[in-house]
Image (cartoon, rainbow, N blue to C red):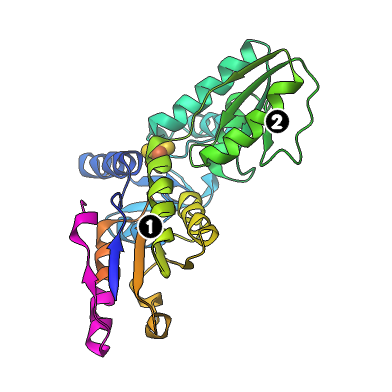
Amino acid sequence: MEIKLARNMGFCFGVKRAIGIARQIRKETEEKVWTLGHIIHNPQVVKRLEKEGIIAAEDLAQIDSGYVIIRSHGVHPRILKKIREKNLKEVDATCPLVKKAQEKAKQLVSEGYETFVIGEKEHPEVISIVGETDGLIRVIDSVRNLKINNSKIGLVVQTTQSQEILQEVAAFILPKILEFKVFNTICDVTSKRQREVKKLAKKSDIMIVVGGKRSANTSRLAGIAKAEGAHTYHIEKADAIKEEWFTDVERVGVASGASTPDWIINEVVNKLKKIDKNEVNIDINKEEITT
Ligand code: F3S
């Protein structure tokens, strides 16, 4: 059996930055350090950080004092206001690319465009983008629920969406209106990983996509791999891997989301190597590994 690892795996810079900020604050203060919600969509990392004293609060009501880290997805301004009212110390670890999507959405609304964001309505990032525009933009997930009322349309995208959906929506809108302003706010890290997974899945019988089940970018990678015809397993940890998946399998591709740490990826690769002992021949293609 041959295993190929995607070129880009492990944390993206936005996730590294958010975790680095949280750890730095933890080092510098004796006060409590909180994150509002999970700092990233990876339960194993959240558990590790809790052991270090960085606590994930489900709700602002749980937080009585200390520092509140705003996670990489950003937060609705209403929450920021409440943090300030409670006299908590706010630390903004919103990914700069999410900030850019928020700013572009605000700009379009202020310039008078009827503005849409392509994304998942309930995702914290999309909630933050909508919040930044005082609820003046509408969330769409495809052209199905898209109704245009204006001749000036603006468009931004959740950072983890695919270029394909952006193209589909833009192509739908363009012939219908006079003026159309699009900011492609899809994160480059996301686009790169999606392209790699597409390529890898084409050459693989099985794809193992490693990352949190609630991670939007990991789920999207798994969806892309499936669409390319590879038998795809979205797993959070190595212990989810079952040996019977590999019967009569020649090529396995491994990819990870942007919030999956290297140590989990290493555990997955090691588990795959152990299957080797059961007479499965694993050849890790080093050329694909750059992490
Ligand atoms: Fe930021 Fe892109 Fe990561 S938006 S948090 S760098 S996946």
The secondary element bearing badge 2 is classed as helix
232 shown above or below 35: below
Magenta stretch: includes residue 288: yes
Asked which quadrant contains residue 279, the reply is bottom left
Magenta residue span: 270-291
Can residue 45 be seen here? yes
Asked which quadrant contains residue 212, the reply is bottom left
Is 34 placed left or right of 281 in the picture?
right
Q: Amino acid at mark 2?
A: Phe
Asked which quadrant contains residue 5, the reply is bottom left
The secondary element bearing badge 1 is classed as helix
52 shown above or below 147: below
Q: Amino acid at mark 1?
A: Leu
Is 291 placed left or right of 96 in the picture?
left
Can residue 67 be seen here? no
User: Which quadrant holds the N terminus?
Assistant: bottom left
Locate residue 65, reporting x and y percent. 41, 42
Callout 2 environment at 10 Å: few (<14), some (14 to 19), or many (20+)? few
180 shown above or below 20: above
The residue sitting at 81% across, 22% down in the picture is: 149
Q: Tell me the tag on residue 31.
A: none
Q: Tell me the tag on residue 200.
A: 1
Q: Quadrant of ligand 1?
A: top left
Callout 1 environment at 10 Å: few (<14), some (14 to 19), or many (20+)? many
The residue sitting at 72% across, 22% down in the picture is: 175
Locate residue 28, reporting x and y percent. 21, 39
**Of the image marks 1 and 2, the number of the one nearer the N terminus:** 2
Q: CA distance from mark 1 to mark 2?
A: 30 Å
Q: Which residue is mark 2?
A: 172
Residue most extreme to the top: 111
Residue most extreme to the bottom: 278
